[in-house]
Amino acid sequence: MKRSILEQLVTFPRIPMFARKSFQDHFVQADQVMLVLLALHWIVATFVTSITYHTYWYGFISGGMITLPLLALYPSFKGTQTMRALVAVGLMLFSVVFIQQHFGRIEMHFHIFIAMGILTLYKDVVPVFVAAATTLIHHLVFNYLQMYDISLFEMPVMIFNYGGGFSIVALHTLWVLIEVLILGYIIKLHIEYSVKLIQSEKQISGLNEELNYTSLHDTLTGLPNRYNLHAQLNFIVSNARRYHRPFAVLCLDLDHFKNVNDTLGHSVGDTLLVDVAKKLLAIVNTNDIVSRIGGDEFIVIVNDFDDQSALERILMEILSLFHHEWVVETHFLRLSVSIGVALYPDDTHNVDELLRFADIAMYKAKGEGRDRFSFFTASLNQKIHKEVEIANDMYRGLHAGEFVLYYQPKVDIATGKIMGAEALIRWEHPLKGLISPDNFIHIAENTGFIVKLGKWIIEETLRMIRRLMDQCYTDVQIACNVSTKQFQNLLLYEELKVLIDVYGIDPQLFSIEITESVMVDYLEATLEMLENIQGLGIHICIDDFGTGYSSLSYLQKLPIGSLKIDKSFVDDITLQGDNSSILVNTIIAMGKALRLHIVAEGVEHQYQMEYLKTKGCDTIQGYYFSKPLCEEDFFRMLQKNGDSFP
Ligand code: C2E
Ligand code: CA
Ligand code: CA
């Protein structure tokens, strides 16, 4: 890419794309210079000489026939190859005019004109140098001969032809001076543009380097990015294979980092990430690698450790690094990190697998309560394989129509009337029989399949509501469970809106059950989405209430209509009605204070129902009244229930 200025000047390379515009300007300027030269020829050379030497104006008129059309064409053709070709032709024609004018000797000038034409055609200075040198020699020799009346090769001396000694020499000299000036100007232009080109090239190669750097590094922390890490890992693996050295891949994920971003803002979050990067770099050895591969996820490669206990010491060091209070801007933050570890060569020899295994182990650490590390294990691997298998099977099953919704009635605790039902999914597997959602929902969530499955569940629920409405059940509300993962799909709201329209259902008859975990991870965005969904008229119910990160502060903010007490609390209600059901009392009291409709799930016994009734619970759902029923059974039950409510 790099060329010296001299090289740049004598060879004219293909003009790089980025410099085209600038050279276009160069060509236009060169065209202007050449047109001025033509005009000078016309006016000075042909006009003046026509008068001086009585050539009856014909040289002047023919000169005009060359110059004027070129001037007229300039606005439309400036800077183009056509213009340069026309200029060169014009210069050649001028040389013909001079011969015809019987000023024969002036035709000697044509070589410089043509050379200049060539220059403008090819933007190459070599012909101009040659032309300039020959012209100079020509004029020196010729003027010398003329001055001293020397005749060469029997050629008539000019002075005899034109009869004027000094004046013709002076005219010649003047002409040469003008030519040299023009030539100098064109060369100057050329040098300027060449220097510019070199500067641009330098700038571009600088930008290239920068681009290289940014494409390989995380802009926030300056750490190697995912792509870079991959390249380095490949190198490390080939080295490790040669020297039989083990190494460890650590996948770090900050716990509840989203909360920091959501509550304190992104700038605090960013500063925190930069701090984390610095501290991690300070802990590891020089030949270890720290990289950031996404949001709050870091990968650390630990190269030298003697045995597993040495590695564990490093892991403990990283964990305890987070146990100190972090001061970011004016905030004191408590942080923790979950770390997954995959080992080379014990777990795998493959770079992609190392990263994936470390990631899986990290999720295991999260699942076990965060703020800890977890090693990848073969059993974890088997579990993953099995999950992938099941996910594939689910995909097939969905297309084969093997999923069905069952409906578990929700009953008004005071009257025993069916108010609605919860849709619960079942998998009618051709080989394995009826599979309960506990066996596949979490896999669908882990693999992302839940988005597809969830869409089917919603649509199926709406179809059911349509059927209920068609059979004039206009006060039975059907709820479906919407998984946290489905809220990551930003189109959820749009999809609901469209489907409600398509099925033409009354949105009041549709309800969604969400768990509290929806709130914890995606506060801002989820809140907005929930508000929009509620805006459609859909009822929102908090499911499994009391088991998650219950916090009154967010509960107040949420656009929810009802609260479902988890089965585990209902289980606490015993026949004796002792203190163990205090939590149920509190939850009901809290729900009432927030003016929420209260549902209890998993009610299996009459005494549980009666207890809940005395505390003010509105609706019950559970085996005491009915198990989840297939669609037809549910309709039969509705019919029977309706008969007792005339
Ligand atoms: P969940 O939302 O808490 O659903 C209630 C579960 O308790 C259901 O189990 C229901 O059959 C069971 N149940 C109801 N009454 C009683 C009772 O009196 N005693 C006992 N022992 N159990 C009772 P199921 O249908 O196996 O569903 C399990 C979980 O799977 C559900 O818990 C829910 O989290 C999930 N799930 C089910 N269907 C769907 C769905 O369509 N979408 C999503 N995302 N999750 C679903
Ligand atoms: Ca539920
Ligand atoms: Ca539950």
Image (cartoon, grey):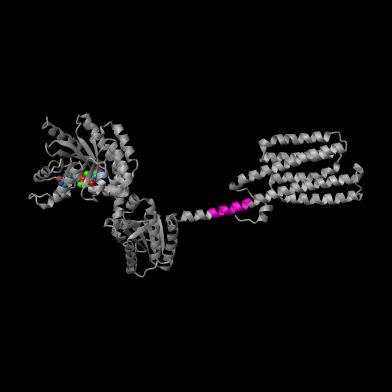
- Foreground residue among 361 and 322: 322
Residue at x-position 37% and y-position 61% = 249
- Foreground residue among 314 and 45: 45
Location of residue 426 by image quarter: top left
On whether residue 201 falls in the magenta region, the answer is yes
Residue 541 locus on image (x, y percent): 23, 42
Residue 320 locus on image (x, y percent): 32, 64
Residue 112 locus on image (x, y percent): 77, 46
Which quarter of the rendered image does ligand 1 occupy? top left
Residue at x-position 29% and y-position 35% = 536
Residue 50 in the figure: left or right of residue 264: right
**In the image, residue 646 above or below residue 595:** above
**In the image, residue 588 above or below residue 352:** above
Q: Which residues are magenta?
A: 196-207
Q: In this rendering, does residue 204 appear at all?
A: yes
Quarter of the image with the C terminus is: top left
Q: Residue furthest bottom?
A: 306
Quarter of the image with the N terminus is: bottom right
Residue 586 in the figure: left or right of residue 239: left
Residue 515 locus on image (x, y percent): 25, 46
Secondary structure mainly formed by the magenta segment: helix
Residue 401 in the figure: left or right of residue 189: left
On whether residue 72 falls in the magenta region, the answer is no
Residue 608 in the figure: left or right of residue 285: left
